[in-house]
Image: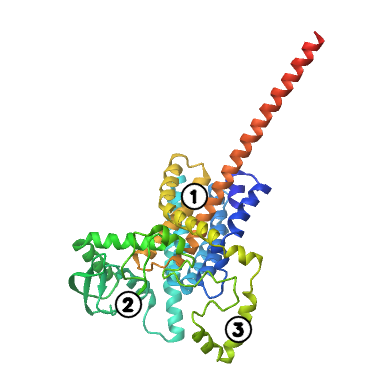
């Protein structure tokens, strides 16, 4: 609605509302994630609020209508929401950082101004500092001595798929033996690396791997991206430590992978697509495990309530259809693969015509999507359900395009009908003239 109003100065009509309903209501991925145990749903909630607020502020600044209070409120709101998302899950800080970065970059391109550059730097630095300060405060409250800001997410930069360490210890001063693996996950070489203090040592590890084995590093990144898009498979093995980060990748079954990706999870287990046509607790994989949990009084009532809620109905039967799931997952894969292409296209089209706000919006959405995916790719978090927010954002672009196509077809039909009607009227007038003659 905001995009239609700000970019086209029009309201949605009933046909466009129907398009939105089809893409959102009949979407088992959106329905499947409406579950309290998944942080991705909460992340999407905050991301939606932030994108809406950021776009409103963006449109105000483009039209030179923003007040000083708007700048202050956006700065404070960005810092607060970034901290909340960081504590929800560290990598989710990208939901605000990337959106703010791209929008500030677009505004600087639109009208070069030193004040805009200063404000952009101020916002980004403040968002990073808000994570640092809030983490230190939390650690002081709970009495934790280490700092997860420097030891959590940055350590994951060292998680390269085809470089398998002998253990997970990458503390300062630790020397580990790293095995270089081929596509079949067989050792082709080994080397040692000593981790020093700071993130530079972690980046040095990645650089050393890239200099000596560039093909292995890049192949690992490509495989991670394709796993998140559910094109490649990552068969999980319990004997491999870091089962989402390391391990062999199956690349030769993309169609089977997309069709089998019912659960939107890297290991393709029953996490998201609950069996809504039967009454059983789908969180429990075996009857023995279910019996064990039901023996606990506090869990027994929860299980019965869950079964009641999970009873089959018309909507759940539609959503559990294999046909709908296959179509939806195919769309999921296409949208994630298309994110970098849409980002590049919308960026250059925005450079060519900076007055087209829709291109700026597309660049922000697709740029956020691609950046979020790349962050998880390079940190070894190749779990496709983490890309749920990316899917939702790319779905906005798809819906907007569908609405534009619908509008174009509608205008063509109206114009064609008007021409046809005028020709008929001309024919009638001509026949009247002939009769009078």
Note whether 119 is above or below 137 in the view shown.
above
Seen from the viewer's position, the closer of residues 205 and 229 is: 229
**Residue indicated by mark 2:** 241
Residue most extreme to the right: 436
Measured as percent of width and height from the top left, residue 390 is found at 47, 60
Q: Earlier in the sequence, mark 3 or mark 2?
A: 2
Regarding residue 103, the answer to whether it shows in the image is no
Residue drawn 46% across and 64% down?
Answer: 261
Measured as percent of width and height from the top left, residue 83 is found at 48, 71
CB under 8 Å between discs 3 and 2? no
Residue drawn 24% across and 78% down?
Answer: 166
Spatial separation of the CA atoms under disc 3 and disc 2:
33 Å
Q: Secondary structure at mark 2?
A: loop
Measured as percent of width and height from the top left, residue 355 is found at 51, 41
**Residue indicated by mark 3:** 302
Residue drawn 22% across and 73% down?
Answer: 178
Seen from the viewer's position, the closer of residues 85 and 410 is: 410
Seen from the viewer's position, the closer of residues 216 and 397 is: 216
Q: Secondary structure at mark 1?
A: helix
Note whether 324 is above or below 403 in the view shown.
below
Q: Secondary structure at mark 3?
A: helix
Q: Earlier in the sequence, mark 1 or mark 2?
A: 2
Spatial separation of the CA atoms under disc 1 and disc 3:
43 Å
Q: Earlier in the sequence, mark 1 or mark 3?
A: 3
Which mark's residue is nearer the viewer, 1 or 2? Answer: 2
The quadrant where residue 415 appears: top right
The quarter in which the C terminus is drawn is top right
* Residue 362, disc: 1
Residue most extreme to the top: 437
Measured as percent of width and height from the top left, residue 336 is found at 44, 56
């Amino acid at each position: 609605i905001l995009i239609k109003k700000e970019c086209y100065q029009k309201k949605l009509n009933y046909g466009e509302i129907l398009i939105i309903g089809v893409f959102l209501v009949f979407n088992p991925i959106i329905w499947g994630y409406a579950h309290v145990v998944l942080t991705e749903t909460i992340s999407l909630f905050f991301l939606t609020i932030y994108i809406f607020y950021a776009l409103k502020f963006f449109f105000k600044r483009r039209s030179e209508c923003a007040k000083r209070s708007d700048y202050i409120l956006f700065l404070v709101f960005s810092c607060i929401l970034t901290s909340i998302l960081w504590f929800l899950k560290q990598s989710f800080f990208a939901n605000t950082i990337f959106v703010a970065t791209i929008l500030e970059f677009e505004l600087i391109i639109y009208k070069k101004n030193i004040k805009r550059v200063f404000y952009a730097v101020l916002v980004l630095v403040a968002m990073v500092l808000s994570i640092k300060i809030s983490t230190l405060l939390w650690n002081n409250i709970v009495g934790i001595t280490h700092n997860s800001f420097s030891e959590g997410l940055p350590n994951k930069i060292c998680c390269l798929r085809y470089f398998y360490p002998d253990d997970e210890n990458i503390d300062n001063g630790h020397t580990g033996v790293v095995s270089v693996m081929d596509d079949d996950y067989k050792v082709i070489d080994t080397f040692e690396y000593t981790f020093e203090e700071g993130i530079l040592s972690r980046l040095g590890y990645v650089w050393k791997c890239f200099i000596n084995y560039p093909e292995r590093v890049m192949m690992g990144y490509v495989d991670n991206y394709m796993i998140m898009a559910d094109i490649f498979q990552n068969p999980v093995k319990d004997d491999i430590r870091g089962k989402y980060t390391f391990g062999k990748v199956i690349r030769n079954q993309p169609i089977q992978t997309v069709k089998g990706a019912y659960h939107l999870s890297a290991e393709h287990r029953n996490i998201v697509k609950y069996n809504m046509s039967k009454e059983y607790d789908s969180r429990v994989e075996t009857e023995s495990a279910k019996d064990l949990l039901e023996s606990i009084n506090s869990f027994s009532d929860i299980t019965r309530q869950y079964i009641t809620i999970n009873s089959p109905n018309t909507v759940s039967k539609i959503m559990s259809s294999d046909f709908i799931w296959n179509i939806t997952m195919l769309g999921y894969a296409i949208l994630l693969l298309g994110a970098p292409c849409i980002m590049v296209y919308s960026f250059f089209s925005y450079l060519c015509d900076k007055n087209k706000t829709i291109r700026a919006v597309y660049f922000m959405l697709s740029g956020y999507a691609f950046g979020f995916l790349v962050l998880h790719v390079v940190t070894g978090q190749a779990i496709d359900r983490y890309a749920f927010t990316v899917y939702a954002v790319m779905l906005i672009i798809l819906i907007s395009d569908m609405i534009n196509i619908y509008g174009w077809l509608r205008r063509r039909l109206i114009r064609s009908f008007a021409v046809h009607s005028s020709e008929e009227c001309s024919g009638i007038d001509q026949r009247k003239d002939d009769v009078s003659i």
